[in-house]
Amino acid sequence: MDFKGFDRPGGPGGGGTRSVKVMIAGGFGTGKTTMVRSVSDIKPLTTEETLTEASADVDRLIGVADKTETTVSLDFGKISLNDTLMLYLFGTPGQERFWFLWNGLFKGALGAVVLVDTRRLASSFRAIEEMERQNVPFVVALNVFPDSKEYPLEEVRDALDISPHTPIVACDARDRASSRDVLVALIRHLKERSAVPLESR
Ligand SMILES: Nc1nc2c(ncn2[C@@H]2O[C@H](COP(=O)(O)OP(=O)(O)OP(=O)(O)O)[C@@H](O)[C@H]2O)c(=O)[nH]1
Ligand SMILES: [Mg+2]
């Protein structure tokens, strides 16, 4: 796989490993922590706390009724995609009361994966709007749960008002290979855009 431009820290002719900060974002319970856990080469750092009964009214638990924990600060993991490209993964908290943390967390990020649960599209709408506010290129990853309906990707694009340039892929966040494919799609997208010099953010 050729990731020219992402693998030369010293610029043209440079060597060594390029490190890239990538956000794993999305609405509440869409599988962000699951993805960081499944794909990370190292034991990830997670900051999960027990979901309180108080939040049950606020967070729509349809489809994730057996969910007992939620990320309160961040998830952190890393994966080397090839010999020269290391991704540092930062999973965001999903509960909207913790979204104020996103501003700090996104600092220096070159791209993001926005996980979407098509059973609860509304919970993802704000996450996609937030990407535009953070001004970071992203791919949308539909995390397919066993009872998810199969929607044509373009229908999801319309429903969530996702720009035609933003890739949408389906995935299973529990599966390492599938999660890795999402990250590869993101790096391809960043490379195609080549809009952001790697050193500048
Ligand atoms: N069947 C299935 N279950 C999943 C998948 N991804 C996550 N889950 C389950 O869905 C629930 C939510 O996953 P999390 O990874 O905690 O979601 P999150 O986005 O980190 O949640 P918050 O941090 O609370 O926003 C958990 O109970 C997971 O076991 C998936 O791809 N398929
Ligand atoms: Mg989480």
Image (tube, helix red, strand yellow):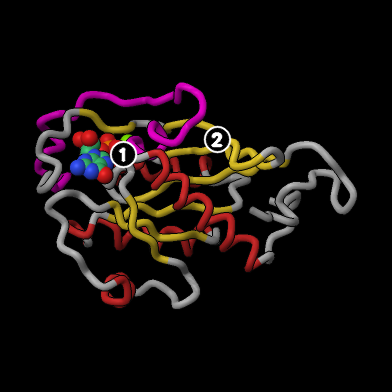
Secondary structure beneath dot 2 equals strand
Q: Please, what is the three-letter code of the amino acid marked with disc 2?
A: Ile
Other-residue count near label 1 (Cα within 10 Å), few / some / many at <14 / 14–19 / ≥20: many
**Residue 158 seen anywhere in this rendered image of the structure:** yes
Taking 196 as reference, is 60 above or below it? above
Q: Give the residues in magenta.
A: 33-60
Whether 32 is among the magenta residues is no
Residue at 45% x, 52% y: name it: 182
Would the CB of label 1 be found within 8 Å of ligand 1? Answer: yes
Residue at 39% x, 26% y: name it: 46
Q: Locate residue 160 relative to residue 129 in the image: left or right.
A: left
Residue at 46% x, 21% y: name it: 43
Q: Which residue is mark 1?
A: 174
Q: Which residue is mark 2?
A: 79
Q: Earlier in the sequence, mark 2 or mark 1?
A: 2
Q: Residue furthest front?
A: 1
Taking 109 as reference, is 189 above or below it? below
Other-residue count near label 2 (Cα within 10 Å), few / some / many at <14 / 14–19 / ≥20: some
